[in-house]
Image (cartoon, helix red, strand yellow):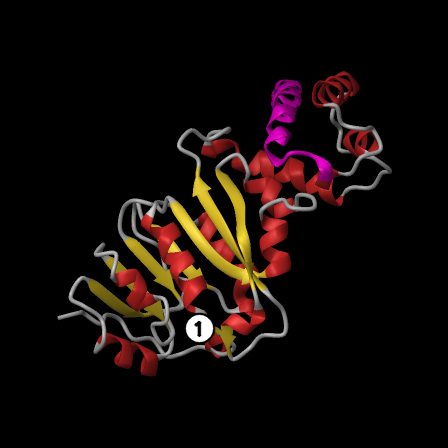
Amino acid sequence: MPRTLHHPRPGAHELGQNYLRDPRMVRRVVELAGRTCGPLVEWGAGDGSLTLPLAALGRPLEAVEIDERNVARLSRRVPAHVTVRCADILRHAPSAGSTLVANLPFHLTTPAVKHLLRSRGWVDALLITQWEVARKRSGVGGATMLTAQWAPWFESRLEGRIPADSFRPRPTVDAGLLVLHRREHPLLPARRRPVHHDLVRRVFTGPGRGLEQILRRAEVPAPVISSFLDRHGYDRRALPRDVDPAHWTELLAPERGRADGARRRRG
């Protein structure tokens, strides 16, 4: 029999989820999940519109849902290899080696994605989000600061658009299917994450007209800037969003050198 675990009280953010009802879109999500390996985790299982088709893959599946009523109903419908857990997705940690599937409540998209990126262990994630969020997080039309900050550790791509009519209740905007994959060989070690995040933040939020000026004001040495722009063919008047998110890692060596020099001078 399926097991139902810890039952916290539902929080205020349990409301607002739109259930995926289009069979074609459900099949597409399940097809993509079937190409991955390891156990499955579903955030925001709701009434099981994705849970039951995912269960048909025959892999261990943990379905996480905050509404106790949905948990009770879904627990009675799933096969034995599915565990239904009553929990908050913003506090849940996907299991090691897992593939996460989530039809995210639109108002929780940003905190849920940030929580996911900070979580260890999972390998792939299939996320249904607002269309514009899916585009931005996959770098379509230009990279965002969040995408650039996490690019050394995760790859992202857009798998397509999901019309608003595919959901019930119907949302006011279309959705997109965003796919994240944890890099087997990260571009930077985890210990470099704080300095990389800081550099990207300063570049994306700093003043200046064009990359050259922005990078100068972010205290990147002029020779490094010139080499960086020329090597990748970036226009000096381009914006940070125009840079391949993975390229920012190339600017960290001089950052480390200046930090080491400053420590020696203080010593």
In the image, is 245 to the left or to the right of 4? right
Say which amino acid is labelled 1.
Arg
Q: Where in the figure is residue 206, as x and y percent of width and height? A: 78, 42
The number of callouts visible is 1
Q: Is residue 259 magenta?
A: yes
| Residue 110 visible in the shown view | yes
**Can you identify the residue that label 1 sits on?**
21
Q: Could you say which is closer to the camera, residue 222 or residue 35?
A: 35
Q: Where in the figure is residue 187, as x and y percent of width and height? A: 50, 28
Is 180 placed above or below 17 here? above
Helix, strand or loop at mark 1: loop
Please tell me which residue is depicted at 23% across the width and 76% down the height of the picture.
77
Q: Which quarter shows the N terminus?
A: bottom left
Q: Give the magenta part as a residue range.
A: 242-267
Q: Which quarter shows the C terminus?
A: top right
Q: Where in the figure is residue 256, as x and y percent of width and height? A: 60, 23
Q: Kindly indicate the quadrant of the structure image that contains residue 228.
A: top right
Q: Kindly indicate the quadrant of the structure image that contains residue 229.
A: top right
